[in-house]
Amino acid sequence: MFAEEDLTRDAFLGGRVQAWQPRHGYRAATDPVFLAAACDARPGQSVLELGCGAGVAGLCLAARVPGLRILGVERQAAYADLARRNGVEVVEADLTDLPDDLRRQSFDHVIANPPYYRAGHGTAADDPGREAALREDTPLDRWIAVAGRRLAPKGWLTMIQMTERLPDLLSALSGGFGSVTVLPLMPRQERPAGRVLLKARKAGRGPFTLLAPLCLHDGARHDRDGDSHGEIARAILRDGMPVVWDGPPKTRSI
């Protein structure tokens, strides 16, 4: 477990969410916030997060949508302990070896921010927790297969991933998902999208939809102190606005 002096208390959604995180190791930034904003959960529904880390995505989702049952799965004991301290219900387990009671449950939504980097690619992180969070040990198709088994009929899977992994995601989804919608997240105008948000419906029959990219920052480069996020990104990250999947972006806050 983490020692108290190795923890920081960090704010998300403009301070509405406070979460303990390791000072060194894997630290949640904007990706879990975007993941939470992209989940179309409604009050009274259930949400399972695979690989929840310290629980930031679940906390941000709960802050926006009241009355949810949110359950996290996390294999790293120290991070599972942090998530519980942050107020998230957590099962400590590898997603490929879930306990029997969880395998008997189904959920309206599954959300996930799987490791971005393929095994054997790039330079390993010095911190073991950060390395485990960022580098793939379980292939993406296994993440999606597990999500499919835990989803209720017509349930929704929501993920955030690197753009270069999109072909892997689409290939894995072809076995049991449809109604796939992809929202690219590009850092600035005329820059390639580095991340994608994706949602897919179990046994969905809707067409594939590629939305216009959401530009996260104003200007060609970061040349001033302070927040350079664009209006929509700022509303999501600071005000708790949900991602709008079925129309033009809005800036309505919670």
Image (cartoon, rainbow, N blue to C red):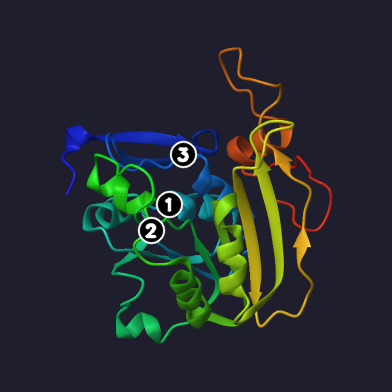
Picture coordinates of residue 182 (x, y %)? Answer: 69, 58
* Residue depicted at 62% across the width and 64% down the height: 41
Q: Which mark is residue 29?
A: 3
Q: Determine whether, in the image, residue 50 is placed left or right of residue 63.
A: left
* Left or right of 206 on screen, residue 217: left
Instruction: Mark 1 and mark 3 in contact? Answer it, CB < 8 Å.
Output: no
Q: Identify the residue shown where x is 72% and y is 37%.
A: 232
* Figure quadrant of residue 51: bottom left
Distance from Cα at disc 1 to Cα at disc 3: 17 Å
Mark 1 or mark 3: name the one nearer the start of the chain: 3
Judged left or right of residue 243, residue 90 is left
Residues under numbered marks 1 and 2 in contact, where contact means CB atoms less than 8 Å apart:
yes
Q: Amino acid at mark 3?
A: Ala
Q: Residue at x 80, y 58 (%)?
A: 246
Q: Residue furthest right?
A: 248
Closest to the camera, between mark 1 and mark 3, is 1
For the residues marked 3 and 2, what is the alpha-carbon distance in whole angstroms?
19 Å
Number of the label disc, if any, that sits on residue 117: 1
